Image (cartoon, rainbow, N blue to C red):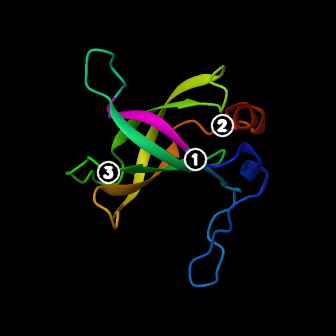
Amino acid sequence: MSDSKDLDAPKAESSGGRERRVRVRYPTDRESMCQPGEGRLDQAWWLARLTDISTTGIALVLRQLRQKFPAGTILTVELQNWTGDVSRTLPTRVVHMTPHPEGGWIMGCAFVNPLTEEELKALL
């Protein structure tokens, strides 16, 4: 697991040397839970690894997931800060899914309602 001090250093984002995203993404390494749809408590939730977060979205690794979701699929994600005293359940929209080298998927998701800077800092 990463140190919380790693959160102070934004993750560089480039594609072929060209910056594509407007928002700074903060690297992290913590567990999360997610579920397709509206996040119902009577449905199964999947364990995921949160790898980065910004005001507009997150990246998750789901190793046990075998199916691929099309872009636009709603995914509800439970997020907590490092100490566990701040928790949010947020709807996201799948932007892309890439096969993970060790199995499962790397998912890029955009928040349906972007976070404010204050909300993001509370989750870091």
Q: Residue furthest left?
A: 67
Q: Secondary structure at mark 3?
A: loop
Q: Which residues are magenta?
A: 30-37
Q: CA distance from mark 1 to mark 2?
A: 24 Å
Residue 122: give x, y in percent of width and height.
73, 30
Residue 10: give x, y in percent of width and height.
73, 58
Q: Does residue 58 sit above or below 116 in this rendering?
A: below
Residue 24: give x, y in percent of width and height.
71, 56
Which residue position is annotated with label 2?
A: 115
Q: CA distance from mark 3 to mark 1?
A: 17 Å
Which residue position is annotated with label 1?
A: 1
Label 3 vs label 1, nearer the camera: 1
Please name the predominant secondary structure of the magenta segment in the image. Answer: strand
Which residue position is annotated with label 3?
A: 63
Instruction: Say which amino acid is labelled 3.
Output: Arg
Label 1 vs label 2, nearer the camera: 1
Residue 124: give x, y in percent of width and height.
70, 38
Instruction: Say which amino acid is labelled 1.
Output: Met
Q: State yes or no: discs 3 and 1 in contact (Cβ < 8 Å).
A: no
Q: CA distance from mark 3 to mark 2?
A: 26 Å
Q: Is residue 115 magenta?
A: no
Q: Secondary structure at mark 1?
A: loop
In the picture, measured across the screen, residue 95 lies left or right of residue 69, that is right
Q: Nearer the viewer, residue 68 or 3?
A: 3
The residue at the point 32 percent across, 51 percent down is 63
Mark 1 or 2, nearer chain start: 1
Label 3 vs label 2, nearer the camera: 3
